[in-house]
Image: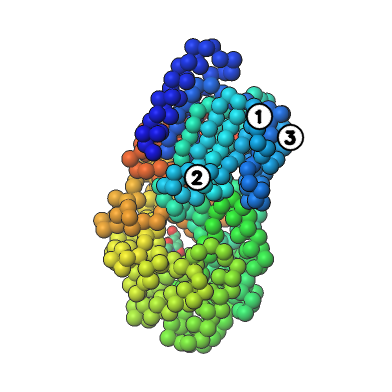
Amino acid sequence: MKNDWSSVMYVSITMMLTLFASCSTNQPMDLTSESIIPKPQVIAPTGNSFELTEQTTIYYHGGSDEMKQTAVFLAEILRPATAFKLDVRLAEDKEQSGNIYLNLTDLDEGQGSEGYEIIITKETITLNANHPEGLFRGIQTLRQLLPAGIEMKKKQAGPWLIATGEIRDYPEYAYRGVMLDVSRHFFLPEQLKQYIDLLALYKINILHLHLSDDQGWRIEIKSWPRLTEIGGKTEVDGGKGGFYTQEEYSDIVNYAGERYITIVPEIDMPGHTNAALASYAKLNCDGKARELYTGTEVGFSTLCTRDDSTYKFVDDVIRELAAITPGPYIHIGGDESHVTKKPDYIYFINRVQQIVEKYGKQMIGWEEIAQAELLSNSIAQHWRNSEYPVLAVNQGVKILMSPANKIYLDMKYDSTTQPGLSWAGFIEVDSAYLWDPASLVKGIGREDIIGIEAPLWTETITNMEELEYMVFPRIAGYAEIGWVPAENRDWNEYRLRLGRHGKRMDAMGINFYRSDLVPWIE
Ligand code: IFG
């Protein structure tokens, strides 16, 4: 396929020279000067421009609802700032100038379900992909080829020009995620949807929700109602907390799914369980219900791992959660179980893993789970210890990389950052970018890693403004680490591209951190 592509490059460059020579009517533009994040694998410019106009129609091939939904998503992105009608129609045979076409085609099989290509000429824009998910990823690139004003919610002056050429793209890692801790501080469904919308632009494809901890239980479990009636009533610093009904959770799952983002629910066990232990006395080994906790200590709680009634509880929780989680994973936590004896911890993880498997899901756990006997399709999430993930690799288990000193979004940028913590060190925008998951930990190679995930723990994060400040712009770099091969990433090039991308985050209304390390173009 490479030599086909080099012939495309040769043809494209020849066309570009011819076009310039012919003094084309359209405004010349250079596709390679755009600031797409994450950077596409291959960009071949042809030096001209396509104009989006009132007459533009978006056509989709194949009558599936998913294809139509993808085309409608593109139209809804483009309509507010252009005020164009942008009809969405089932494709006819003959292509007409000025239109956008979404097609399912057999791309190079190496591109998987997320691969896509965009072919932009003066006349038409064509997005091709193996699957609608790939078209959706391509739409995020197309968005970024238009001026930043396209992200504004009210009519902006045009013209709406897109540089011509070809883009061929697909991700390095299959799992490119973020985690949001909704236990320490609760975030409303509409806030999660707002966050999901922002993540979609960067081709993030997993949202891990940390739904339970010492300070709050956030998901309705119908067979154990007091988990939310009592365990959902508070949060760090004594706020009113909250929880998602199963209906609200399903709505979030569907909203994320429409943007090809999979929800991974986490019930943290056997430690980090004070909210459950305060809700049901019988979950405690001494039979006494704990007080609700609104501090920020960790490691002081444990389920009663040798009591069979605990596994009835776990079974009910996992059963109900699996029934409303279409994604393949259930995260069972497993971190900082400092008051669970090691043999009891191992026994607990082994039994919980069987329960997760019984309900047809794959278990993810923080790296400490590597002390147990893991199924080959379980996943260990690396966060701070290098022995546990290597133990997991030696069991043939894949690693999800979340090294706290590189990717914990609750880490301050520097000592002046208001919210956040610093136990894993400061993480400025350059440090967040300057690392390679495949060479970070001795004993964990590229073939052992399913991807990366950026956790935002919310002991100190109480609202969307603080969330956006800690997440952006670092998440753009993490999205690039997840999508672009390490050999194609360079901080000196990326910081300039990020600097040009700043006005797009402004247009999206994101309260991002304007690091002095980035030359922000206003
Ligand atoms: N470690 C704890 C989190 C949170 C975090 C804050 C993990 C896996 C410190 N566990 O990270 O609950 O308190 O940075």
Q: Quadrant of residue 250?
A: bottom right
Front residue of 269 and 252:
252
Q: Is residue 505 left or right of residue 155?
A: left
* Residue behind mark 2: 106
Which residue is rendered at x = 59% and y = 74% of the image?
Answer: 320
Mark 3 burial class by Cα count in 10 Å: few <14, some 14-19, many 20+: some
The answer, for residue 20, to whether it is visible in the render is yes
N-terminal label among 1 and 3: 3
Q: Quadrant of residue 297?
A: bottom left
Which tag is nearer the camera, tag 3 or tag 2?
A: 2
Which tag is nearer the camera, tag 1 or tag 3?
A: 1
Amino acid tagged 1: Gln
- Quadrant of ligand 1: it is bottom left
N-terminal label among 1 and 2: 1
* Residue 475 percent location from the top left of the image: 47, 46
The answer, for residue 414, to whether it is visible in the render is no
* Residue behind mark 1: 96
Element type at marker 2?
loop
- Cβ–Cβ under 8 Å for marks 1 and 3: no
* Residue behind mark 3: 85
Amino acid tagged 2: Asp
Confirm or reject: label 3 Cβ below 8 Å from ligand 1: no
Element type at marker 1?
loop
Which residue is rendered at x = 50% and y = 38% of the image?
Answer: 117
Confirm or reject: label 1 Cβ below 8 Å from ligand 1: no
Q: Is residue 139 above or below residue 347?
A: above
Which residue is rendered at x = 45% and y = 16% of the image?
Answer: 17
Cα gap from disc 3 to disc 2, whole angstroms: 31 Å
N-terminal label among 3 and 2: 3
User: The C terminus appears in which quarter of the rendering?
Assistant: top right
- Cβ–Cβ under 8 Å for marks 3 and 2: no
* Residue 515 percent location from the top left of the image: 45, 38
